[in-house]
Amino acid sequence: MLSVTENNEQLKIKILSKKEKINKVIKQCNDFLAKRGISDFVVIEKILKELIENAIIHGNKGEEKKKVTIGLKFVEDNKYKIEVQNQGSGFDHKLLEFNDGVQSGLSLVKSLSEELSFTPKGTKVNVIVTLNKSEEKNKIEKEKIEEESIKEKNIEEEIMQETNEFENFEENGVVVIVPKGDIVSAKANELRLLLTEEIKNGKKLFKFDFSNVEDIDSPALSLFIILPKMLKVETEENRPEIINSTQKITNLFNYTNLNKFYNISGKRG
């Protein structure tokens, strides 16, 4: 008996407690990993062999009718989770010292993995392991990431060119941003991109001239809530400055406690 279920993220295999089934399980796991670009199977083969033999011999006590369930799951990046469960009575895994007998096999598994743990009853062992991808697979993924990054940058540039709702320039080391009208959700993304780019370029001092602004809606206001955190504002000297604000907007900043993170001056009626 060898029962296999598989999808893009995980592989599950059930076998009877027969040692001759181990190589078939390993082959199924290698095939699953190969589809994900993994080329080095040495680590996975050693871990699976030790865990399945342990489940058959020590867990199920060699009783062939008892089953062993093997799971292989993708976690993230090159990390995978291996699960091996037996139908035995379990054992007190807290007493393990990783020295002789069964423990020597688990010592090998522990040395090859990032994490080794058991369920409370001790009938299931979980292992987290990092596996190497082939150079070709790494190259393809790197090219894909670079391509997506270029696309994202082009989209951002297009947005900036199409909207251009904010004038910005530098004055005595301070980035001055002058909105051309009310700051609403439709313009929030342009402002976000502008602020992110300036901060990425090392700018820490900002001034907003609200001469043309009568209103700020909630989505746009959230940017002004986030900005002090992005700038790590700690003193009054490095707070962003707002000038030529209406009383309505000044009140809005007061009600939301943003006045604690912005220097507001030069109010207009």
Image (tube, rainbow, N blue to C red):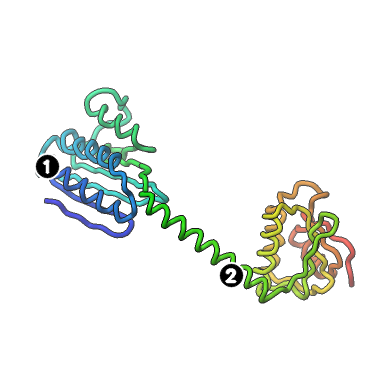
Secondary structure category for the residue under label 2? helix
In the figure, 73 relative to 152: above or below?
A: above
Residue 220 percent across, percent down from the top left: 69, 68
Residue drawn where x is 30% and y is 39% of the image: 43
Q: Which residue is mark 1?
A: 20
Depth-wise, is mark 2 or mark 1 nearer the camera? 2
Horizontal side of residue 53 vs 149, given as left or right: left
Q: Amino acid at mark 2?
A: Ile
Please state which of residues 123 and 12 is positioned toward the viewer in this rendering: 12
- Residue at position x 43%, y 56% in the image: 141
Residue at the image position 26 percent from the left and 37 percent from the top: 46
Q: Quadrant of residue 150?
A: bottom right
Task: Please tell me which residue lies in front, 204 or 86.
Answer: 204
Q: Position of residue 135 (x, y in %)?
A: 38, 49
Which amino acid type is marked by label 1?
Answer: Glu
Q: Would you name the residue on which mark 2 appears?
A: 155
Residue 162: x and y in percent read: 66, 76
Q: How many marks?
A: 2
**Looking at the image, is mark 2 or mark 1 earlier in the sequence?**
1
